[in-house]
Image (tube, rainbow, N blue to C red):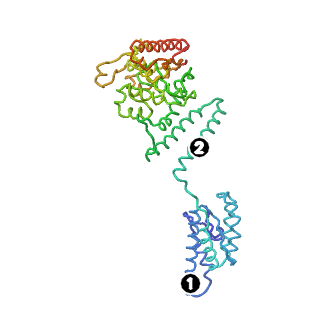
Amino acid sequence: MSSFTELPDSAYGAEDGNGHLGAHEEALDEVVAPRRGGRGRGRAADLRRRVVALQRAADRELRRRGVVSLPAAPSPSRAARAVRGAARPVSRARGALGSVAGREQTRSVRNALFGLGELQQARAVRHALAGLARLPRQRIPSRESLQQELPMHVMGAVGQLAMTLRDLTGRDVIDLESLNELLSFAYRAAEVRKNHQQRQYQLDDFGFDQEWAETVLPLVKLVYRKYWRVEATGVKHVPRRGPALLVSNHAGVLPFDGAMIKTALFEHGVDRHARALIADWFFGIPMLSWFLRRTGQTLGNPDDTHRLLRSGELVLVFPEGVKGTGKPWSERYRLRRFGRGGFVESAIRAQAPIVPISVVGSEELYPMLADIRPLARLTGFPYFPVTPTWPWLGPLGLVPLPSKWRIEFHAPIRTDELPVEAADDPSIVMQYADQVRDVIQEGLVANLMQRRNVFRG
């Protein structure tokens, strides 16, 4: 960018590589130092150095502020009026910096200064420097504002890219809905992390952090919709308020079925967190136990189940336990025994309805071909599965297969018609437990018949 304090190139040469004057100093010698004695020439040289220093200071200040025009300071002098008149067209030409028009306007300021004497140039430059204090400084946005605005800018840019790719290819290359879910997860996770650093969070007696759980929910919804393409029916049978006991089959080596059942509730308008009861050994894994607690899970203890139901919560139980998740591939979708029916006792004591749930799709996540019992005892796990991908593919074998899921919520089985003392009668408890098991098994068979293909549905 040309400096506004340069003299005309045609008369006095070009600036040097740093934007300062080269032949300018020699030209000033000829202008301010007429043919006179050595004393006059010395005073003129001293004045010339002062003017050049002021001009260079003005150059640096203007370049630092990103402008090329001289702000006009009120002055009755002819120098100030000349500079102010020449600076007006430069202000209008700020958008044309780097173009021919911008350079031409800048030369008009140089010419205005060149036509004046040394003292008049010094006064004009001093007035210009005084006016720099009134120039607005460009504000650097804060980190907080950048964090708030970044997702919107990224979403806008990616949206424009998605529309361009759709116009070129004729199909949706970028899934904007999925991208929006990821951005929502990242944005809310940053906010929750900030609140946790400031110790602004609430936990219930079981360690459940509702804000944190709902932060992770968009990411789980993405898996629910896009990876396993879950179809849920009968969600209307889940009560919108009050206690209820959700009872489901259990499979898949790892308990992904619990996460999908909880997500199905939110996907169908039931904005309630189902509190799953988990086997003890899951809570022995350090990071996993913290995650389970924060998202609302707790130990499968009868006392905890009763407390949750009495407080009006939805409680999700898997009566098959680890025997269900550890079933071999040859016994898929065959329900194991439901134990002694402890979940029925809790439901009767709390007078809560029982909602049976049939889940199809979880058995194909990790088809268990064998169970190496010695390694299971060595690692402390209830089983050590061998699947088509594990342990042959290493960590990649832990990625579950993209099976097609179907979840059916059946009509509730009422327990409020029974007296509380019926919980102590084993015959009544086992009768209700068998009834729930039969409903779930029939639902599994019916949904398997409706699913034509394991992966395509």
Amino acid under disc 2: Met
Q: Answer with left or right where residue 447 lies relative to residue 369.
A: right
Q: Amino acid type of disc 1?
A: Arg
| Residue 152 marker | 2
Give the class, few, some or many, for how many residues have Cα within 10 Å of label 2's Cα (few <14, many ≥20).
Answer: few
Quadrant (top left/top right/bottom left/bottom right) for the N terminus: bottom right
Residue at 60%, 72% (x, y): give it.
Answer: 130
Q: Is residue 406 visible?
A: no
The x, y position of residue 423, in whole percent, is 41, 18
In the image shown, does 382 or 140 lie closer to the viewer? 382
User: Quarter holding the C terminus?
Assistant: top right
Q: Position of residue 255 (x, y in %)?
A: 43, 24
Q: Is residue 63 visible?
A: yes
Q: Nearer the viewer, mark 1 or mark 2?
A: 2
Q: Quadrant of residue 327?
A: top left
Q: CA distance from mark 1 to mark 2?
A: 62 Å
SS assignment at label 1: helix
Name the mark on residue 43.
1
State the image coordinates of residue 68 (x, y, percent, origin top left): 63, 64
- Between 381 and 167, the one lying in front of the other is 381
Nearest the eye: 55 or 425: 425
**Number of numbered discs:** 2
Check residue 322 in the rendering and tell me which mark sits there, or answer none: none
Q: Residues within 10 Å of mark 1 (few under 14, many from 20)?
A: few
